[in-house]
Image (spheres, grey):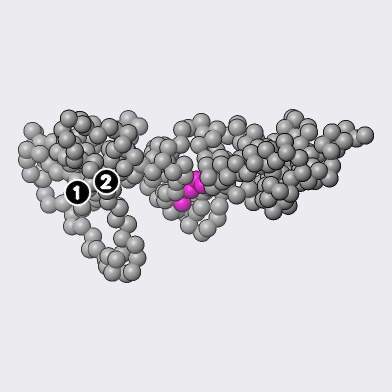
Amino acid sequence: MAFPASSRWQYKCPFRKAWVDVSDAEDRQLKEAFLALARGGAPVAQCKLGSLRFRTDFRTMLRTNVASQRCAEVRLRDGVLPFAPPPAEEEGPSRASLGLEEGLPKERIAPCDLESGPAAQGKVSHLVRKAWGQGIEEGITMSGQFEFTMQASDKESFGEMLSWQMLAAGIPPPSLDNRCLKFTDARGTEAMGNKQEISKMLTNPGSYPVRVSYFPHPAFKFVRPERVPELEAMRTHLKFVQEAVAELDGNMDNVKHTHQRRTFERYLLYLEDHYYQTGDDLHDTLNWEEIVQKYGADKEMFFLLTKKTGPGLSKILRGEIDVLEYLFGG
């Protein structure tokens, strides 16, 4: 049993909408794996091409990119298979018939005039198309967070899978905060921010499937880890403002001096902008002592004045305390 000399495995490219020859290396690996079926080999071929890994299931004739989980059909060009491939596993009831979500991609719909209009207007710009979801690869979310499940057979491909998830979520490598990368094994045990515990989990065959999730705090999405202490301090200052605004019922009439009313108005804008930009309601803000304890004594410099004025901000705005006397006595 052998493959015809001129034959070549192909996959159906979803972007070019055409059948494309696989590389020489992948063609050789696929043919060896297929012939091994006659000797009781596995029905799924694992192909490694440089830094990429593909999994081809001869039962379904589907090729899967291990990192992105994208699938493509495969076939043999210029020849017939030496023998029939193994039958596909019998499918169970569909998710829809069980009352579950089908997991079908939502169709991206552009406004009706996106493809129309006078020819003189030229093509619609890429930025406009991207805003309406056109020209974006399937799976790209730019959400700043992700979650995926890793089987035991994927263990050696963890790096590629993680890289793809970061790319899809729009997370540059320097912005990944590994303290937020959580691993949950089949028993529900979690490992997070501890290299030894994570390594122990991934090397234990009984841990799989392992769910890998990355859900950073909304205030720190797309932020480099070294900037987090600075943003934590900013949130603490905003918390001082939030509490003062609440104590004054958000009413500018409760502010005594005219110049402070202008400041109060800016405070309201700062808060609304923060809520809108991040979705962070400041409910879990650290106080200044906790920030110093968590990130180091040098972070006290952020609060040299505000550790006094912050807690008393509402009294300062009401005119009950003079800020200079509050700071320096008198």
- Left or right relative to 168: residue 37: left
Q: Position of residue 4 (x, y in %)?
A: 8, 37
Image quadrant in which the N terminus is located: top left
Which disc, if any, is residue 61?
1
> How far is the residue under mark 1 from the one under mark 2?
37 Å
Residue 214 within the magenta-colored segment of the rendering:
yes
The segment highlighted magenta reads: 211-216
Residue at image point 54% right, 35% down: 223
- Left or right relative to 73: residue 172: right
Residue at disc 1, secondary structure: loop
Q: Position of residue 307 (x, y in %)?
A: 78, 38
Q: To which residue does mark 2 refer?
A: 111
Residue at image point 31% right, 36% down: 128
Residue at disc 2, secondary structure: loop
Residue 296: in sight, yes or no? no
Q: Is residue 279 above or below residue 260?
A: below
Residue 304: in sight, yes or no? yes
Q: Position of residue 44 (x, y in %)?
A: 26, 48
Amino acid beneath label 1: Met
Q: Residue furthest bottom?
A: 98
